[in-house]
Amino acid sequence: MTSHPHPRADTVRGAAFVALSAMAFGAMAIFGRYTYAGGADVLGLLIVRFAIAGVVLALIAIRRRVVWPRARAVWPIMGMGGIGYVGQAFCYFTALEHAQASLVALLLYLYPAFVTLLAAWWLGERLTKVKVAALVLCVAGSAVMVGGGRGEPLGIGLALAAAVIYSLYIVIGARFTRGVDPLATSAIVCLSATAVLTVLCAARTLAGAPPHLPGTSGGWAAALAIALISTVAALLCFFAGLDRLGAARTSMLSTLEPVVTVALAAITLGEALTPLQWAGGASILIAVLWLVRAGGGAHDDEAVALEANQ
């Protein structure tokens, strides 16, 4: 007799997978800081992250006999990785050099608000009163976060730029990745990002300013953690949870990500949040949950799967 898992038990497992994914993604900013402390620069960190993650994800996809997309579908995904993902990652990890990790994480989490606006502008989705109210709350929360946080204008600007680029990545990607296995998409995105970063590394080396890889064992450990924990493991857990919970509940649980970053930043980096920052961060997370409950194209299965590629 074949036994089938109880639906409630499967839901609990799905929630556990998404929570683990959120913790892994949330730790990425902290690992980034330790990688920098080990002597790496942004380009060195990113080439290690995407090269290792891309190869591992591709091997997993091959082992699972994932169906790869046809050539016509591959080119847009490569563009997403080589342009969108590289741009977002550069902004995010550079912002960490100029602002609090907790501030950067919460500002990045404005992307659901930007996705909602882009979906209304490009896709003609209706902006309901609930969505408008949530967007206003997001803007107010981010203003309070910036006012109460510690960060150079460059760091704040780059964090916001990362959120905008990420939003474009999701809205465009939700169209071009429809019907493509998420694991195949993730592998192609990471490998495409690696190809572009390799060209950038070569250009900088020829110009006499080669990228700096980690120079200590601690720096390498942190860089490997970004690739294997905050990318590969986080993606696999996310997709396992998404398969069991669906898009809406997965998106809601994913709001744990900035909470984890804030908590780890306080524990490991001594980044104490002011009461004003707590209020602003809480406003952003409440608004994001509100947007998820309101529904919309920004949170369908394809878009949520793309949200995993942080």
Image: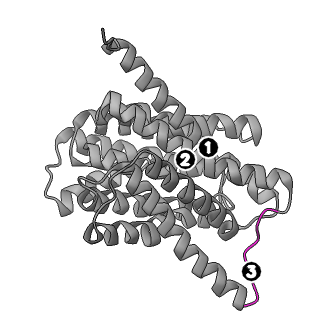
Q: Determine the residue positioned at 35% across, 65% down.
A: 77
Mark closer to the observer (2, 3): 2
Asked whether disc 2 touches disc 3, contact meaning CB atoms under 8 Å apart, the reply is: no
Name the image quarter holding residue 98: bottom right
Observer-nearest residue: 59 or 168? 59
Tell me which amino acid carries mark 3: Pro
Observer-nearest residue: 97 or 178? 178
Tell me which amino acid carries mark 1: Ile
The secondary element bearing badge 3 is classed as loop
Asked whether disc 2 touches disc 1, contact meaning CB atoms under 8 Å apart, the reply is: yes
Residue 261's x, y, as percent? 61, 40
Whether residue 146 is visible: yes
Alpha-carbon span between mark 2 and mark 1: 6 Å
Applied colour scheme: one colour
For disc 2, the marked residue is 232
Whether residue 147 is visible: no
The mark that comes first in sequence, 3 or 1, is: 3
Alpha-carbon span between mark 3 and mark 1: 27 Å
For disc 1, the marked residue is 229
The secondary element bearing badge 1 is classed as helix
Crowding at dot 3, Cα within 10 Å, few <14 / some 14-19 / many 20+, comes out as: some
Tell me which amino acid carries mark 2: Val
Instruction: Considering the whole magenta stretch, tell me its main secondary structure.
Output: loop
Count all numbered tags in the image, as a single digit: 3
Q: Determine the residue positioned at 71% across, 91% down.
A: 207
Asked whether disc 3 touches disc 1, contact meaning CB atoms under 8 Å apart, the reply is: no
Judged from this view, the residue extending furthest toward the bottom is 207
**Range drawn in magenta:** 207-214
